[in-house]
Image: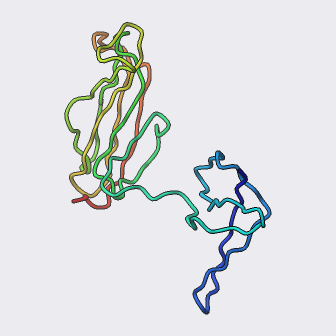
């Protein structure tokens, strides 16, 4: 099945929308997170029907956790309308290494519980099986907080972490 991209042009004085077929075609399996074109099936006569006019990145759902990963290392992020921050870092607890929060600087966030380890595909960690370490923080006041985490073996005193993660979080308002 062929899909055609539809462009919408607003007719300002009458607030009407006219659908004008574009020359570019896109397969239904094409994915681009930066663009969300309206895709419609083209009929045998070339006529098209508008299915959706939404273009642009999707807005984050209100009051959902903001998930951060190693890709966010060194960045400054805004909490916006998220109810909490979840930092999800890959690692392997069976090697003795673990991600721990080493420092929290600033008044905006508070750590919720301990860092949790989730092994991939198993209920109980199996030697050599990697997983994720999850740290959760909730906003408690407007402001800026920097979170530092280190990947180290807790029994090796005086040895610096083999990896570090730092993120700065800006909280404009505390979500209700």
Residue 29 percent across, percent down from the top left: 64, 45
Q: Residue at x 67, y 59 (%)?
A: 41
Q: Quadrant of residue 105?
A: top left
Q: Residue at x 42, y 50 (%)?
A: 77
Depth check, front residue: 135 or 14: 14
Residue 167 percent across, percent down from the top left: 40, 41
Depth check, front residue: 38 or 41: 41
Residue 48 percent across, percent down from the top left: 69, 67
Is 150 on the left or on the right of 28, as rendered?
left
Depth check, front residue: 40 or 85: 40
Q: Residue furthest front?
A: 44
Is 80 on the left or on the right of 57, as rendered?
left
Q: Residue at x 42, y 9 (%)?
A: 128
Q: Quadrant of the C terminus?
A: bottom left
* Circle count: 0
The vertical placement of 59 against 110, above or below, is: below
The vertical placement of 25 against 48, above or below, is: above
């Amino acid at each position: 099945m062929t899909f055609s991209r539809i462009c919408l042009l607003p007719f300002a004085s009458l607030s009407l929308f006219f659908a004008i077929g574009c020359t570019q075609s896109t397969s239904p399996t094409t994915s681009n997170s930066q663009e969300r074109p309206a895709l419609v099936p083209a009929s045998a006569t070339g006529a098209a029907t508008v299915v959706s006019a939404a273009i642009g990145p999707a807005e984050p759902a209100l009051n959902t956790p903001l998930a951060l990963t190693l890709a966010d290392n060194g960045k400054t992020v805004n909490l916006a309308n998220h109810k909490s921050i979840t930092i999800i870092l890959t690692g392997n607890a069976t090697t003795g290494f673990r991600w721990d929060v080493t420092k929290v600087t600033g008044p905006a966030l508070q750590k919720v519980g301990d860092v949790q380890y989730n092994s991939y595909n198993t209920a109980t960690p199996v030697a050599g099986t990697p997983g994720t370490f999850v740290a959760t923080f909730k906003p408690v006041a407007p402001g800026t907080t920097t979170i530092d985490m280190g990947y180290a073996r807790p029994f090796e005193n005086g040895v610096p972490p083999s990896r570090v993660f730092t993120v700065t979080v800006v909280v404009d308002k505390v979500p209700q």
